[in-house]
């Protein structure tokens, strides 16, 4: 919502930009911000999918990560899981690798939907 308001304010100012270089730079910044917002949203959704209560005792990517990283203190755990979710999201759109993988059907379905975005 804030991003939409921000772009609503920026759009009228674009007509005052006369330099083609500045317009190109603004376009690149707009695309980068769009990618960052989309990455954040998908990462948050991936976290929610992995952090849900399992009804039949299924392992999730979050529980698996917590088991692997047992030395994490609670103060840094949330940030580590969020940055891991962001990393996972970025690897869905790039040829990067990631040790976090879907551990159940819901996570696999979410992963497939993310790849089709």
Image (spheres, helix red, strand yellow):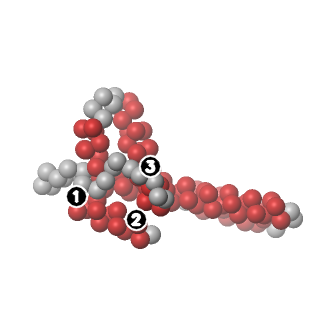
Q: Which mark is residue 114?
A: 2
In this view, 77 is above or below 91: above
| Badge 1: residue crowd in 10 Å (few <14, some 14–19, many ≥20) | some
Residue 18 visible? The answer is: yes
Question: On the picture, is 101 further left or further right than 3?
Answer: left
Q: Quadrant of the C terminus?
A: bottom left
Question: On the picture, is 36 further left or further right than 86?
Answer: right
Q: How far apart are labels 2 and 1 at the CA level?
A: 15 Å
Q: Nearer the viewer, residue 93 or 46?
A: 93
For marks 2 and 1, the one nearer the N-term is 1
For marks 2 and 3, the one nearer the N-term is 3
Residue occupying the point 76% across, 63% down? 24
Q: How far apart are labels 2 and 3 at the CA level?
A: 14 Å
Rendering coords of residue 57 (x, y %)? 14, 51
Residue occupying the point 62% across, 57% down? 32
In the displayed image of the protein, which residue is found farthest to the bottom? 116
Rendering coords of residue 53 (x, y %)? 21, 51
* Disc 1 target residue: 104
Q: Secondary structure at mark 3?
A: helix
In the displayed image of the protein, which residue is found farthest to the right? 18
| Badge 2: residue crowd in 10 Å (few <14, some 14–19, many ≥20) | some
Rendering coords of residue 4 (x, y %)? 60, 62
* Disc 3 target residue: 87
Q: Secondary structure at mark 2?
A: helix
For marks 1 and 3, the one nearer the N-term is 3
Total numbered badges shown on the rendered structure: 3
Residue occupying the point 46% across, 54% down? 96
Q: How far apart are labels 1 and 3 at the CA level?
A: 19 Å
To which quarter of the image does residue 22 belong? bottom right
Q: Secondary structure at mark 1?
A: loop
Q: Quadrant of the N terminus?
A: bottom right
Residue occupying the point 29% across, 66% down? 109
């Amino acid at each position: 919502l804030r991003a939409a308001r921000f772009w609503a304010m920026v759009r009228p100012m674009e007509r005052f930009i006369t330099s083609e270089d500045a317009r190109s730079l603004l376009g690149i910044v707009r695309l980068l911000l769009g990618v960052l917002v989309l990455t954040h949203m998908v990462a948050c959704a991936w976290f929610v999918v992995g952090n849900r209560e399992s009804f039949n005792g299924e392992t999730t990517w979050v529980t698996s990560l917590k088991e692997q990283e047992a030395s994490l203190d609670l103060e840094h755990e949330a940030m580590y899981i969020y940055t891991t979710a962001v990393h996972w999201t970025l690897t869905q759109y790039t040829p990067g690798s990631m040790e976090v993988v879907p551990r159940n059907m819901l996570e696999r379905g979410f992963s497939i939907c993310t790849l089709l975005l």
